[in-house]
Image: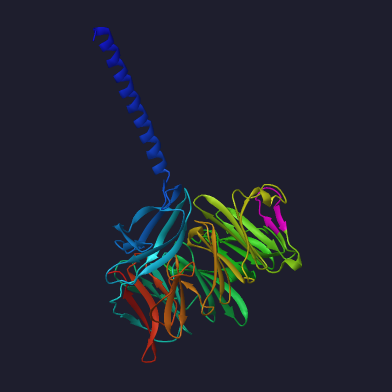
């Protein structure tokens, strides 16, 4: 073989080798890209795109079983799942189990970050014994504090539950609460103040109690000599509130002790999120409040539309406007309308019959959950996955045990369930609402012992 021919053969071999390498690299990159996007072969050998599921639990370290097969990783972890339904079960030695059937969607992330497992070998620990009948047992939004109000007693009990301790403080409200009977209590988001609706000779009075410094508390009704109704904290620190006064919507600044001019009149209901404010008039007109211009008319409802509820919220940077119109729940997402009758500027992501006419509609869990309720019937919209869940409770007394657990008391027993109605479990004997502390370690509740009310806690994470 001459030298020229040999050189040509070597060149051909080099070209073929490099071509194969380039093709292999390109194929590998494409394959890895498809894998990263969740594509794989299903049981039938067909190519399909998977969804990513984040699986977290409290406590962590739970064993994960998917469709009957145990995987190597434990919580907290992520897993690619083929499109369709899958049953996920979490177990851990010494704890109860948790199970849910979910739907994995191609190319989408599904967050399951709320699975709560309860330690089974628990011993109820008595924290305190009450000297009278308990009227209110109200935990702060962060669940680090709780207030206990005894009937006909203006010395309220304030507990600091941070860490493993239970620090008790007596709030002497004798002066500000004289001759007043509390009927509603609501915390501000910073857990520094409580808004108290009271009765005095069948007349309503509203108070803001500063639990960190009682001397800075104020009776709004007396301070401004106005007949306020439907008062709500407008800021996290409780320094600003919105209130209706004879149908007029006003803003109250407690630090400056001022009340605004009329922001809107003939108002029946209102809702807000940060600086955005929405109101419904008695004439059934829905409008967005504008500080420096005319308010924007969002919608007009007729009497045949039924009961109207409204709520505003934000979740992961997205604005939501939710309403129940009769037995229909509607959820809009996006920027709020900038012109009259332009609700269509927002994306309608839910328009569904829920089978009942809600009495209330409230945002929960920092905007992730929107809860419509009437007596025992409940509908929950999850903004994370845009899914609506509807079911019926055992009774009308529903409360939040943590950010995702709903609780009820049935025949002296505490039952909890996930927000979507699944994983209903009997937890313990209790006579009141219950809650789990922010650190996730303790469950607090009231119960009766020898005819007296006692505050009890149980360690639910070992």
In percent of width and height, residue 243 lies at: 61, 65
Q: Nearer the viewer, residue 19 or 258?
A: 19
On screen, 190 above or below 449?
Answer: above
* Residue at screen point 39% across, 55% down: 54
In percent of width and height, residue 113 lies at: 40, 59
Q: Is residue 173 visible?
A: no
Instruction: Quarter of the image for the C terminus: give it.
Output: bottom left
* Residue at screen point 51% across, 49% down: 317
Q: Can residue 17 be seen in this view?
A: yes
* Residue at screen point 45% across, 71% down: 417
Q: How has the structure been colored for display?
A: rainbow
In reply to whether residue 292 is colored magenta, the answer given is yes
Which quadrant of the view contains residue 97? bottom left
The single residue placed furthest to the front in the displayed view is 1
Q: Nearer the viewer, residue 156 or 268?
A: 268
Answer left or right for 120 relative to 138.
left
In percent of width and height, residue 412 lies at: 43, 85
Q: What span is colored magenta in the figure?
A: 286-299
Which quadrant of the view contains residue 30? top left
Instruction: Quarter of the image for the N terminus: give it.
Output: top left
Answer left or right for 81 relative to 305.
left
Q: Which of 72 and 132 is in front in this view?
A: 72
On screen, 41 above or below 267?
Answer: above
The single residue placed furthest to the bottom in the displayed view is 450
* Residue at screen point 36% across, 92% down: 450
Answer left or right for 5 relative to 177.
left
Answer left or right for 451 relative to 302.
left
Which quadrant of the view contains residue 141? bottom left
In reply to whether residue 462 is colored magenta, the answer given is no
In percent of width and height, residue 388 lies at: 55, 63
């Amino acid at each position: 073989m001459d030298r020229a021919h040999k050189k040509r053969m070597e060149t051909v071999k080099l070209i073929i080798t490099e071509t194969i390498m380039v093709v292999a690299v390109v194929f590998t990159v494409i394959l890895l890209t498809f894998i990263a996007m969740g594509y794989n072969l299903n049981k039938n050998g067909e190519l399909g795109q998977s969804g990513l599921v984040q699986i977290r639990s409290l406590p962590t370290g739970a064993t994960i079983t998917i469709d009957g097969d145990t995987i190597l990783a434990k919580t907290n972890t992520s897993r690619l799942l083929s499109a369709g339904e899958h049953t996920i079960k979490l177990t851990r030695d010494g704890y109860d189990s948790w199970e849910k059937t979910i739907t994995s969607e191609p190319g989408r992330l599904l967050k399951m970050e709320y699975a709560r497992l309860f330690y089974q070998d628990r011993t109820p620990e008595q924290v305190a014994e009450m000297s009278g009948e308990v009227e209110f047992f109200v935990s702060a939004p962060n669940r680090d504090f709780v207030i206990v109000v005894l009937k006909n007693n203006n010395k309220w009990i304030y507990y600091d539950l941070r860490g493993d301790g239970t620090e008790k403080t007596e709030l002497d409200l004798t002066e500000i609460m004289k001759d007043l009977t509390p009927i509603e209590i609501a915390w501000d988001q910073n857990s520094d103040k409580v808004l108290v609706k009271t009765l005095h000779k069948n007349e309503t009075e509203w108070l803001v109690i500063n639990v960190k410094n009682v001397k800075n508390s104020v009776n709004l009704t007396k301070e401004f000599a106005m007949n306020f109704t439907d008062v709500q904290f407008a800021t996290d620190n409780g320094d600003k509130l919105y209130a209706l006064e004879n149908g007029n919507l006003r803003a109250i600044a407690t630090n400056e002790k001022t009340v605004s001019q009329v922001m809107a009149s003939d108002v029946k209901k209102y809702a807000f999120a940060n600086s955005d404010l929405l109101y419904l008039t008695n004439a059934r007109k829905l409008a967005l409040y504008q500080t420096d211009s005319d308010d924007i008319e969002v919608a007009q409802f007729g009497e045949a539309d039924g009961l109207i509820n409204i709520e505003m919220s934000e979740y992961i940077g997205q604005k939501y406007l939710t309403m129940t119109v009769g037995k229909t729940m509607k959820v809009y997402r996006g920027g709020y309308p900038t012109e009259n009758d332009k609700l269509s500027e927002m994306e309608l992501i839910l328009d569904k019959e829920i089978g009942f006419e809600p009495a209330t509609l409230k945002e929960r869990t920092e905007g992730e959950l929107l809860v419509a309720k009437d007596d025992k019937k409940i509908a929950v919209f999850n903004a994370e996955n845009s899914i609506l869940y509807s079911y019926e409770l055992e009774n009308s007394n529903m409360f939040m045990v943590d950010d995702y657990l709903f609780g009820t008391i049935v025949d002296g027993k505490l039952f909890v369930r996930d927000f979507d109605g699944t994983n209903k479990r009997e937890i313990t004997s209790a006579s009141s609402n219950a809650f789990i502390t922010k650190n996730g370690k303790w469950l607090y509740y009231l119960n009766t012992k020898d005819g007296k009310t006692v505050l009890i806690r149980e360690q639910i994470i070992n």
